[in-house]
Structure formats: structure tokens, C-alpha cells
């Protein structure tokens, strides 16, 4: 498999010991590096750039046609049947999309006041439903140690649907966890939900860069809404993406209104367009959408099967190598299919301290804390937090101690991640463990559990001065 060029992959970063090193970016679950071809695509478009919604002059025609191509191309690249599905772009990422859909479905089916959310969701696929649904029910994850721990509890889903029979509006799940990388059986959830006339929303933010929609041939197993953020797919500044069954996208109430969403306006009223454009009032993120279409075209040409094989292999190798580290705790059942991310802790080293040292001394970018998935992370940490020894700690230090322990370190992977990157991460962690006493003495920690080096704090304008 030929890996395309990514911007920033060879960036050299200064280290706390006075040297420098090429950074190793293991924070792709937050935002991966930018695909160079998508940024080149923008540069090619800009000399002809104009607004859409017109073909009155050549530049407007070029931009309008390019935008139309992008909409169709994204559906095609991801494997959606254009006769069944349509697409809309909303806000800056998945958060805006889920807010739109949650509000719309609450208005569309008020007779079904219950919404189900899995217990392993990112806040973007959690809080919008809590805000807009009269009643929110969480589908628990399996809590049995070493047996499907961290996975969605399908039996509980079925039981909850029976308990709330006839009341469930929709179920919202992720296809791939941003914390553990554990995969959700989307087809099975769709099949179960549709028996109860409940819609299914799929958060594909973590999977869209490595898996196409992988749609079942069985109509009962097809998702009703498929959501992701363009910035998670190697395309910074691209929007949130909503792909939905055509009829649903036509009937979903729009909550922004303006030019581009209407076919006619008079002093007596207005008429909405009978297409997905009714969800996209105003000037769209033209450049971001076209760049995203270019990225997905590149991924399709590489082959999603090859990308998925690479992603699974990197995750398996990382799991295997990290498991050799003495004192490591890896979260979620390690025998479950997973891809994209692994979260862990090292005994006697706070997650904030480990992440800071990896950055300051090894140029390794990882993320720590709760990854905007607090309920899921806390469920995985439950037994460890219960076992914290708080006896003898002064009252004013107890919360700080809990803050330092309530979190994890996450290494997350992308198309550009190599086995050498994983080896370097593992060797660096072992080196940190062997030298932790000296390294710890160079850091201070604040009330929230964030660590900062006492003498190494490069000024950001040295790297980028707008």
C-alpha cells in the first residue's frame, strides 16, 4: 500500500534536553495530520473561487459544479447508494450535526419521547440528545473484568427496548470508540432497533478515515443517519457531515433558515427546497467540502480494504507491544476487535505526567485525561477509583489527587502510523519508567492534574506567528 503525503509528518520539535527530534503523532483520534493532496486541491480551486448558488459567470459555475461534484463524490467514496441516501454539511464537526438531528427528531416524532445512547459515546454524541430528548436512556457497557469489558451490552439493549416498547425515537451509537478503539456491531444494532421502529444514528467520526460505510445488503441493517467530522479524515477546516436516508433528510425539520434553503420567498411566506439543501441555509463551507471530497477520493483509490487491514494491524501490534510493559493497564477487553486507539495507564505514573514527558523529552504526541467521553472513561476506571487510598490526605488535597488519577493516556493511530512509531513509543515508556524519579522532579502539577515542565515551555509563536 502506497502511503500518500501528509503535512507535518517530518516536523522537528525541540526537546527538554536541548536536542530536537521528528515528532511522532499518535493523537489521530483527536485530529490526524492533513493530507497534502487535499490542501493542494484547495490551492487549485482558489484562483477560480466564487460563491455557489449561481452559474451566472464562469467562476461561479466552476465553484457550483465543483461543490455539486463533491457532494456526490463523498457518497460514492464511502459506499452509499445515491438513490437511497443524501448528504448535508453542518457546522464545524459532528457536534453540530448531532445537535441538528436530535432537535429535528424530537420535533418529528414527539409521540416517541425516549432516546437511547450507548455508554461509550463521545460528548458530541451524548449531550445533544440529553438536551433535546424528553427522556434519555443509556445502554450500558459490559463491566465484567476480562470478558468483553468495555463493549456495548447487546442483551441490555434488547431488554431496554422491550421495557420502553413503542416509545423509543432513536438509538445513537458509535461505530468505533474514541477511547478504546473497540468496534460496535452496527448491523446488529440496526436490525434490533428497526424491529421496534427506532431510528439508528451512527457516529462514524473515528471510523470514516479507515472504513467505508460497509453497508449491509439487508435493508433492516442499514443506518438511518451516518455522521462524521471532516477534520477527523485528514482534512482540517472541513465541516460536519450528515448522511441520511433521503426521505428522512427531506422531512427532518431544519433549524437554520435563509438563502440556499428555499425555492421561493414572498411577503406571505416561503417554500423550502425538497432536497437536502433545506438543511444548508447560507453559503456552505465550499472549500472544506471540496477538499474533503478530494481526501475521500484518495482513500478510495488506495482501497478501504487495504486501509482497514493496515489500521487493524497497527492496533494489534500496538496492543501486543504495549502489553509487554511492566505495570501497564490497558482498558477494554484486549481480545475484542479494535482499531484506531488504545488507552492505558502505567502504575505509579499519573496520566498527565506520562503524556507531558512523552511530549517534552521524546516528541511523541499522545492525549490524556477523559477524551470528551467522561461516562465511558469513568466506567472503565471504576474499580481503580474505588481502590484509591485517600486515608491521611489533607482535605484540600483529596480532589487534586483524584483529578490526577481520573484519566488515561491514549495513543491513536492513522494511515501514516508505522510499526517503528509503536516501537519508539514502547521504548520511550520503558525509558520513562526506568528514570521516573529524576523526570518527576522536573515537573509541577496544578489542581486539575495538569503537569508542566519547570524550565521547558517553548513559546508558540516561535513555531507559528499569524
Image (cartoon, rainbow, N blue to C red):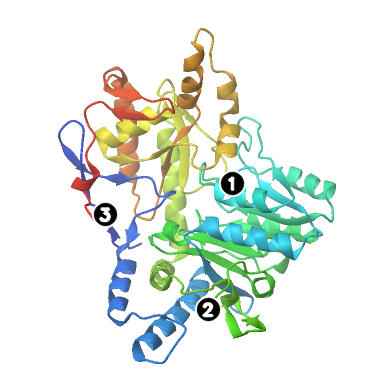
Q: Where residue 232 appears, x then y in whole percent?
A: 44, 56
Q: Quick one: 17 or 189, which is closer to the camera?
A: 17
Which residue does the image show at 57% across and 42% down from the upper left? Answer: 336
Q: Which residue ends up furthest to the front in the rendered image?
A: 267
Is tag 1's residue or tag 3's residue first in the polypeptide sequence? 3
Secondary structure of the residue carrying tag 1 is: loop
Rendered image: mark on residue 259: 2
Which residue does the image show at 78% across and 60% down from the upper left? Answer: 110
Q: Quick one: 269 or 404, which is closer to the camera?
A: 269
Which residue does the image show at 24% across and 44% down from the upper left? Answer: 460
The image quadrant where one finds the N terminus is bottom left
The correct choice, above or below, for 58 with respect to 96 in the image is below
Q: Where residue 361 appears, x then y in whole percent?
A: 25, 33
Q: Is residue 427 left or right of residue 311?
A: left
Q: Is residue 214 left or right of residue 200?
A: left
The residue that label 3 is drawn on is 8
The residue that label 1 is drawn on is 121
Q: Are marks 2 and 3 in contact (CB under 8 Å)?
A: no
Amino acid at each position: 500500500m502506497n502511503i500518500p503525503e501528509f503535512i507535518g509528518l517530518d516536523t522537528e520539535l525541540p526537546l527538554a534536553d536541548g536536542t530536537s527530534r521528528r515528532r511522532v503523532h499518535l493523537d489521530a483520534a483527536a485530529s490526524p495530520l492533513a493530507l497534502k493532496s487535499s490542501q493542494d486541491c484547495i490551492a487549485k480551486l482558489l484562483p477560480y473561487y466564487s460563491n455557489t448558488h449561481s452559474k451566472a459567470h464562469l467562476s461561479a459555475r466552476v465553484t457550483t459544479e465543483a461543490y455539486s461534484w463533491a457532494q456526490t463524490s463523498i457518497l460514492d467514496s464511502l459506499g452509499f447508494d445515491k438513490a437511497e441516501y443524501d448528504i448535508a454539511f453542518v457546522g464545524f464537526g459532528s457536534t453540530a450535526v448531532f445537535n441538528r438531528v436530535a432537535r429535528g427528531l424530537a420535533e418529528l416524532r414527539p409521540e416517541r419521547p425516549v432516546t437511547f445512547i450507548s455508554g461509550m459515546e463521545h460528548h458530541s454524541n451524548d449531550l445533544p440528545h440529553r438536551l433535546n430528548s424528553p427522556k434519555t436512556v443509556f445502554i450500558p457497557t459490559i463491566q465484567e473484568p476480562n470478558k468483553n469489558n468495555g463493549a456495548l451490552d447487546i442483551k441490555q439493549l434488547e431488554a431496554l427496548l422491550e421495557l420502553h416498547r413503542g416509545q423509543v425515537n432513536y438509538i445513537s451509537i458509535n461505530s468505533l470508540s474514541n477511547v478504546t478503539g473497540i468496534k460496535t456491531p452496527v448491523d446488529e444494532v440496526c436490525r434490533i432497533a428497526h424491529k421496534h421502529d427506532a431510528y439508528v444514528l451512527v457516529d462514524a467520526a473515528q471510523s470514516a478515515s479507515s472504513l467505508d460505510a460497509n453497508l449491509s445488503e439487508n435493508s433492516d441493517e442499514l443506518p438511518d443517519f451516518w455522521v462524521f467530522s471532516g477534520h477527523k479524515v485528514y482534512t482540517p477546516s472541513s465541516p460536519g457531515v450528515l448522511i441520511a436516508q433521503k426521505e428522512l433528510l427531506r422531512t427532518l425539520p431544519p433549524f437554520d433558515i435563509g438563502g440556499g434553503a428555499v425555492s421561493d420567498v414572498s411577503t406571505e411566506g416561503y417554500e423550502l427546497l425538497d432536497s437536502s439543501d433545506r438543511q444548508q441555509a447560507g453559503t456552505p463551507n465550499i472549500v472544506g467540502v471540496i477538499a474533503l471530497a478530494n481526501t475521500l477520493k484518495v482513500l478510495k483509490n488506495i482501497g478501504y480494504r487495504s486501509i482497514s487491514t493496515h489500521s487493524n494491524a497497527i492496533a494489534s501490534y500496538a496492543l501486543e507491544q504495549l502489553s509487554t510493559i511492566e505495570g501497564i493497564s490497558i482498558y477494554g477487553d484486549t481480545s475484542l476487535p479494535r482499531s484506531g486507539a488504545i488507552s492505558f495507564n502505567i502504575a505509579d505514573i499519573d496520566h498527565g505526567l506520562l503524556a507531558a514527558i512523552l511530549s517534552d523529552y521524546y516528541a511523541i504526541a499522545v492525549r490524556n485525561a477523559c477524551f470528551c467521553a467522561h461516562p465511558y472513561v469513568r466506567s472503565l476506571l471504576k474499580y481503580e477509583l474505588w481502590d484509591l487510598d485517600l486515608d491521611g490526605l489533607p482535605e484540600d488535597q483529596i480532589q487534586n489527587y483524584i483529578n490526577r488519577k481520573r484519566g488515561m493516556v491514549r495513543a491513536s493511530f492513522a494511515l501514516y502510523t508505522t510499526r517503528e512509531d509503536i516501537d519508539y513509543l514502547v521504548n520511550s515508556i520503558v525509558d520513562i519508567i526506568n528514570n521516573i524519579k529524576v523526570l518527576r522532579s522536573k515537573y509541577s502539577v496544578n489542581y486539575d492534574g495538569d503537569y508542566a515542565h519547570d524550565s521547558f515551555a517553548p513559546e508558540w509563536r516561535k513555531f507559528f506567528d499569524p
